[in-house]
Each structure stands twice: as structure tokens, then as C-alpha cells.
Amino acid sequence: MKAEIVAVGTELLLGQIVNTNAQFISKECAAIGVDMYFQTVVGDNEQRLLDTFRLAASRADVVICTGGLGPTQDDLTKDVLAAFVGRELVLHEPSMKTITELFESRGIHMVESNRRQALMIEGSDPLHNETGLAVGNAFTYEGTHFILLPGPPKEMKPMFTKYAVPWLQAVMTDAVPLYSKMLKFAGIGESNLEHQLLDLIEAQTDPTIAPYAKEGEVTIRLTTRAQSQEEGEKRLFPTEQAIRVRLADHLYADQDVPIENVVLQLLEQKQLTLSVAESCSGGLLSDLLTDVPGSSKSFLGGIVCYSNALKHKLLGVPMEILEGDGAPGAVSSETAVLLAENLIATTGSDFGISITGVAGPSPSEGKPVGLVYVGFAQRNAETAVFTLQLSGNRESVKHRAAKSALYQLWKQLKDH
Amino acid sequence: MKAEIVAVGTELLLGQIVNTNAQFISKECAAIGVDMYFQTVVGDNEQRLLDTFRLAASRADVVICTGGLGPTQDDLTKDVLAAFVGRELVLHEPSMKTITELFESRGIHMVESNRRQALMIEGSDPLHNETGLAVGNAFTYEGTHFILLPGPPKEMKPMFTKYAVPWLQAVMTDAVPLYSKMLKFAGIGESNLEHQLLDLIEAQTDPTIAPYAKEGEVTIRLTTRAQSQEEGEKRLFPTEQAIRVRLADHLYADQDVPIENVVLQLLEQKQLTLSVAESCSGGLLSDLLTDVPGSSKSFLGGIVCYSNALKHKLLGVPMEILEGDGAPGAVSSETAVLLAENLIATTGSDFGISITGVAGPSPSEGKPVGLVYVGFAQRNAETAVFTLQLSGNRESVKHRAAKSALYQLWKQLKDH
């Protein structure tokens, strides 16, 4: 089945945003055996949009459109596509109800243009939008399947995975699906991981082994073709086992989840609690943890002891440790230990993590950008300190420091 | 001058990489007055590549191709384009010399296929590649200007800026550069903002007015054509003023910066300090603030009082307010006030912001997802509470709550 993505939006043509939607959809399509032939970006212009739809319909079996479903005047996708296929736009009552209720609940007047977001092409299937207001559409016209999705990635992505993929699979007849599995690693860099698997990677035929890195974690995607999950698992098994044996200390999940989810799950299973004291990571570790629904079961909270004053006032680090000639300073293993130990004394949690370091862009206390100490305290055990030298800009250092702390906690918990 | 980008590469169609090249080139083109009409991605396939060139040549004055200039079998761009325009491929001697020398210096045998990287379309101008081996090309065929660049961004970007842009400017006769300005708004939704500017937006000709929304903030881009910044500013002035007058309470910057940067700047100017107490936002507000270099000058830190235990222990909220029949609960204006007031008493900061609410996915204390209270305390002034009903998933609620808190602080500071 041949597919084409049509991304609509002048902001893409002006280079204001990157077309990450196209990558996401292409990946998802590959995973279900849909072959992507073209990706096209076109602006908010009626004639060019129409020409683009005509061309796409002539050369693709599936046309997936993103963008231009919003409330404003330059959101033309539905109007132009309706004109192209000769159908009317009709109101999708459930979406209209959601929109109306939302405005009522906020006590603000609903502008009439918002109604546009609840319009659908006549005879299409609605694709529910759980994170936004514009409803998606899917329909077939003269043998071509059209899928319409909003542009914002946080709306488009869940809609595509949850509703568009099953819709596509229902209309597909011939493709042998790709079967993929993600293995997730922490505490190891991409090149080191690749080095340890070099013989496997060089000899790969089926499954394929594709490593890629995000800040502070590495993913390996194993891919084969299979008609069922069972068959897929069987084909992946020998390769997966070989990797597991070599990298047991780093492999924290066999699905695409961040390490914070796994850590919180382990804490909950073992009925243990956590609190954190963050200096250079500035709240990011707490933010990552609280992004996980249900984190309140194990995560008590934390202290963003960004200034030395708060390290002293809230966590009792003596000023003579923090400042002055010959003092270890805020960025030191001494401070990391005191922060973590006083933290668990203050919050009563089972584990306490502290992070103090130099996020940059400039050195601090004469210490280089990227130097970070992670303190790790637990009741009835000695406090540990991990010294890291991280690379990257300010946001990278924050991110890598938070992920490293989570990795240390995971290592503790998995054998706890 | 109408332009089209043709990105060649199956890895783009498989979603293995994001087409950041298209964004880069589009931005650069806008800056020199070249109008981007389409971006197309096509795979390493001879027939589809030929069709794509034919279509692009029929509708664009400039066709900018990236990718497919490498040494391997599936690098087809030059071969196909040469066939399309009916010219031969010829060797570019200086590039060949560089390639040969490189292999010699490394003491490795040069595979014959590397020669392909030094080939050019007959009669084209070479575009020098300082960070890689494949030479770029630029030429004009039947009124259409073609530019060929390699795919790796670290080769393509410097080549485009240093060699393709001047080449383009030399062949352009009519273009006047675009001049744009971003106006940034907080505390107002996209549709409401657009409603207030509807007459301006409907009447727009020059400058154009393009609103778009990100989580918790709205941007308007004003665009005109001008030969100088001074002329550009002059042309934008009346429209910008009209917008400023109507939305003075929301317009926090006239450049593309997040509101936390502006808030921190105002705090520093006025020598005021801030601390935050975060429940449902879980550290995100601290994280946003500490992403800004130099934030330590005004931001002391905060307390992530995620559990009721920490709201009580660290910020002295009585348990009978937080829990029990008839108690206001953790999500209440009473709690928001106490958190903010006890926070500034504890940290000694001039301003204290508290955030408590229901981030979801489930209701809490019988209160709906998205209900958030922002407490705002300052020394020698009454504490204020703002009640928000936010939409979206867990991460959206956290984000919008943090941005709303920053908006309230900005409003205070701008008239302080």
C-alpha cells in the first residue's frame, strides 16, 4: 500500500517549525507495513492545496494530511478536501459538545469560529482528539484512503496511534506487518553500546538492529516481519537474548518508556518512597517524575535548593561548607552527601537523591561546566556519591544529570 | 521568486531522520526574499525522482535538492537530474584531488565509487563542500535554477549559507527580502486573541498577520518586505501599534522568547527575588526558570510539595486544611494562599508563587482535572489567588499552570 503525507502550513514553508509529524507518521506506517512514497509540504493556499490533493490522490493509496484543522481563517484543509471530493462539511455533534462544554466550564464566551473545529467531511469516520479540539477524519474516495489530522504534534501523535492506525489496518489487505520491539538502556552511551554489540550489528539480516540515542538514554529497535505478535517474538528472541546477556546492567525496559516510569513502578512494588534535592537540575528531575500518572504513590516531592541560601535554610548545609576560601563549595561531594542525608531526615522518604553541579554556560566556583555530583541516601545504609562529567549545553547537562540519577536509583531498586 | 525543496532519501520516508534541512533552507530563503511554495520528500527511486524534478521544474523558479550525492549505488540525484536536463556528468578536478588526497593521507585504499562524489552536471557551477566530500552544483535550465546539495546537515548548511545563497542572490532580479517580527502573548488563547484582532486580520495585506499557538503562549508574526530593518520597522509600525493598544495586558515581548526569560529580566532589573511552591506542576515551573542562564540572580529555588505530608512539613499547611471531611483540601484557594505565604516566610524571597491543582488523568478530592489554584504572595501586600480551569492532558495542565503563574507574575512586575 503506497502512502503520501501532505503537511499543510505556511509556518513549515517559512521554516518556523520542523516537520516532525512527517517523521512520526512515516515511522508508524513502516511499522504496520504501509510504504511511504512521498512527503509533501504545502502552504495555506487554496489552489496549491487542491493541486496537491489531486496529485496525491493520483499516485497514492493512502493520503495522510496534517495541519489546517484549526478554528482560524487560514485553516483550509477540510474545506479544500471537501470541495475536491465533492462532499459537504457536516457538524460532528460529540466534538461540538466537547468544545461548547469546555468554553462553558472556563466561563468564557465561545467565538463562533471554534465551531469549525467540529466539522467533518460528510460520510467520514471521526478520529477522536483527546488532547485538543479539532476532530480528525478518515474516509475513502475513489479507492484512495484519506486521513485528516490536526497539526500540533501533541494532538496528532496520540490520534494517529490510537485511531488512525487501526482504521488503516482495517482497510489494508495485503501488507505483511513489520514487528518491532524497543529495548531501552541507561547509564551507557550510544557508541559504547554499539561497540559492545558490534559483531551482532555487523552480522544483522533478520531481525535488523537499529540503535539510536536520546539525551541520557539509548534505544535499540529490533525489527522483523511477522503476521502475529507470537511469530514476531519468536523471530526476535535469539538476538534479544544475546543483547540482554551483554547489557543486563543497562537494559531497563523492553518497551519504549522512559526510565522514570520503571523507577516509579519498582518503588511502588516495593512500597518505598522517594524525595529529591535539586540544585543544578533545577526541578527537572521532579518534573520528569511527576509527568508519570500515579507518581504521587511513591514520590513525596522535593526541594529545588537552587541558591546556597536555600541549601542552608531548607537542608541544613553549613555555610562554611558552601562558601569561603578552602570550602568544598556547593558543587562538591560533601554538599551532595549533606543534601541527600538531610533531605531524607526532613521528608521521611526511604530514598533521597541530591543533584548539585555546574549546568553552564559558565564555570562556577572554578569548576568546569558539566561537573555534577549525585548524592544517594537511604535509611540504614551508607550514602553514596557519583561524580559525573557531562557534555552538552545547559539543558543537556540538566537532562543528563537527572537521567543519571534515575539510573543509579534503578540499579539499586532492581536488586533491592 | 518561487522555490521548492526536493529532499531525496529513503531514510526520510522511513522516518529514520527528521527533515531539518528543509526548515533550515526555508528560513534562509525567507530571509533573502525567496518564497517557498513546496517541500517534497522522495525516495532513492529513479522514476519517482524524475517525476518529482519534472513537477518541481514546472511550478518553481528555484529547485533546491538535498541528498543523494554520496558514493553509493542508491545516490541517484545527479544521474537523474542530468538525464532530465539532457546533460553529461563531468569530473570536477579540484574535488577529485581533495578526495584522493584524503584517502592517501589516511593510508587507505580509495574505493572507485568515491569518484562519484566529484561528478558535476556539465555546465554547472561547483558549490564547494568544506566539511565533506560530495561537491555541490548550481545551474539554470530553461529558466529554472537548480541547486544540488548533499544531505548531511553539517555539510549542507555551511554550503547553503556560504555558496548557494550568494549564487541565488546573483540570479535573482526582483526579490525584496522578507522582514518579520514576532509578538509574544501570554494569558490569552489563540482564538480569543484572533477574535480581538479580527478586523485587522481580515483586512491584512501588508504586513501579513499570522497568529499561532504553543502551550500557554500565542505568537503573532508580522511580515512585510523591506530592503532594510529600518524600512521594515516603519512598514510594521501602524499594525504593531494597533495590536499593542488592544492587547497591552498580554503582549510580553516583541521577539521570540518564552515568558520566563522576560520575568527573570524584570526581576533582575528591579532586584527582586522569587521562590516557588509547586504541587501539581511538580517542578516544571522551577525547571523552566532554571533553563534560563543567569536565573540564579533572582530565582532562589522552591519546594516541590507534591504530597500532603510535604505541604504540611515543609510549608506548614495544617493537616485539617488538607484532609478530612469538609476540609478545603490540597486543591483549594486556602491551601494556595498558605503555601505562597509560608513559602516567602521560609525562603525570604520578595515574591512567592504556589501552584496546586489536579493535573490528571483522574480527578482528585472530587475536583475535576484541570482545576488549578495559583497563589501569589509578596511582602507587604495581600496574597492573591487565581483560579484556572485548564484543558489538555497531564503534561499540558502542568505546562499551562506554570505559564499562567508566570503570566501573573509578569503582570505584577511590568507595573511594579
Image (cartoon, coloured by chain):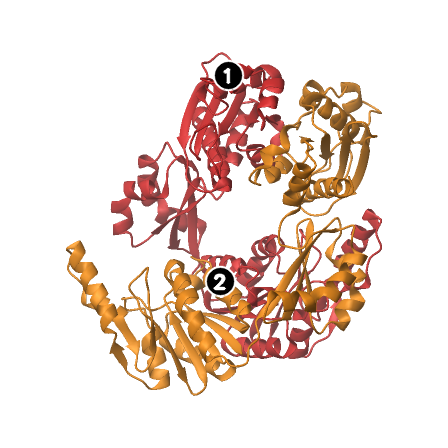
Chain colours: A red, B orange
Would you place residue A416 above or below residue A43 in this image? above
Which residue is labeled 2 in the image? B24
Q: Residues within 10 Å of mark 2 (few under 14, many from 20)?
A: many
Q: In what element is the residue under mark 1? A: helix
What residue is drawn where x is 28% and y is 83%? B88
Q: Residues within 10 Å of mark 1 (few under 14, many from 20)?
A: some
For the residue pair A137 and B403, the one nearer the viewer reads as: B403
**Alpha-carbon span between mark 2 and mark 1:** 48 Å
Which residue is labeled 1 in the image? A321
The answer to which image quadrant residue B377 occupies is top right
Q: Residue A148, can we see it?
A: no
Give amino acid for label 1: Ile
Tell me residue B125's x, y (percent): 34, 77
For the residue pair A42 and A149, the one nearer the viewer reads as: A42
User: For this view, does B166 lie left or right of residue A269?
Assistant: left
Q: Chain of mark 1?
A: A
User: For this view, does A97 lie left or right of residue A310?
Assistant: right
What residue is drawn where x is 72% and y is 33%? B353
Q: Chain of mark 2?
A: B
Tell me residue A21's x, y (percent): 54, 59
- Mark 2 on the same chain as mark 1: no
For the residue pair B359 and A231, the one nearer the viewer reads as: B359
Would you place residue A369 above or below residue B73 in this image? above
Extreme residue in the top direction: A380
Give amino acid for label 2: Phe
Extreme residue in the front direction: B230
Tell me residue A369's x, y (percent): 44, 35
